[in-house]
Amino acid sequence: MLVSEVNYELANSFPFIDFVILYGANFLATAREIRREHPDLSVSCYIDNRLGALLLIAGIPTRVAPATKIAQVFFNRCLNQRRSRVEKQEWQYNIELANSVLPSLSFKPPLVSFPGHQTKNNRVIFHPGSGGSSEGNLRLVDYLRLARKAATIPSLEVVFTFGPNDRLLLEKVQSGIDFPATIIAEPMKLIDFCKFISRSLLFVSTSTGPMHLAGSVNTPTLSFFGASLFASNKRWSPINELAYQSNFLIEPDYDSELIDRIERRLIQLLTSPKPTGVR
């Protein structure tokens, strides 16, 4: 796996990954490190000119990529996927790309598991931030409403988590909480965050990176997506089991009726032994 620095430790923790290379700032040093491994092929789900040039210079004989952007000139096996049609979810396009050279490659949830994490703590996580990556999210007042309702369930721990750029949001949550809740102010390492999510009953958030971490460990998700096709769950659903997904499209001017439906679904997920998905 060729990964950015933020994902390096996480990728190294997965037993199904044999070797991890840091996609570092030093272009030629990274190319030399790739070349030392003598890879037969590369599969790149998202491409740009820098990545394409790197893999070419590294001497990889077969370089697979989607047939998109000018950067495809650096690759010698390109697949026409027309992702703009949103006929599949992004992860399904990625698997399709890999299957063009590795037909037997597949997975089933959970993609990631940790020893002893089959037992869940009685905990729900609210992650209200998006890092600017989501078109559809709830207002903070509605996250607080949902968390306040969850806090009425006996023995349930309500937890708020935040990303590294959510300091202002964190302060607003701290000032708005009037019910029992745990606030985790400092972002965890990704591997620790995955473990924390995997031991939780439910992860509530907009469509953002942490939602996909929850999907990777097959924790039930209550997720909010933009109402446009390109931002919707039809494109960006997580990879947990469908029965563990509850996906809602959020218009910018959404009304109280939508929050009522989300709240009912939240309570159902936290009080039912086996969730069934809402698409």
Image (cartoon, rainbow, N blue to C red):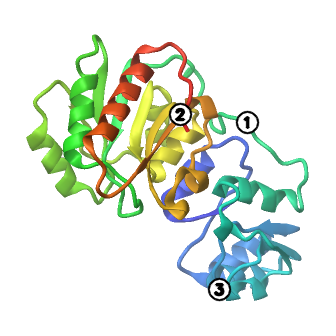
Q: Amino acid at mark 3?
A: Asn
Kind of residue indicated by mark 1: Lys
Disc 2 to disc 1: CB gap under 8 Å: no
| Drawn side of residue 65 relative to residue 140, left or right | right
Up-down: is 40 above or below 174? below
- Residue 236: x percent and y percent? 56, 54
Please, is residue 240 above or below residue 273 in the view?
A: below
- Cα separation, mark 2 vs mark 1, equals 20 Å
The residue depicted at 39 percent of the width and 55 percent of the height is 136
Residue 173, image quadrant: top left
Q: CA distance from mark 1 to mark 3?
A: 32 Å
Please state if 61 lies on the left or on the right of 85 as rendered.
right
Q: What residue did someone put label 3 on?
A: 49
Q: Which mark is residue 108?
A: 1
Image quarter (top left, top right, bottom left or bottom right) of the C terminus:
top right
Mark 1 residue element: loop
The three-letter amino acid code for the residue at tag 2 is: Val
At horizontal 21% and vertical 28% (from top left) the residue drawn is 148
Nearer-N-terminus badge (1/3):
3
Figure check: 52 above or below 40? below
Along the viewing direction, whichever of 256 and 164 lies nearer the viewer: 256
Nearer the observer, disc 1 or disc 3?
1
Of residues 182 and 176, the one drawn nearer to the viewer in this rendering? 176
Q: Position of residue 8 (x, y in %)?
A: 55, 57
Mark found first going from the N terminus, 3 or 2:
3
Residue at the spot 80% in from the left edge and 81% down from the top edge: 75
Give residue 278's mark: 2
Give the percent coordinates (x, y) of residue 52.
Answer: 71, 81
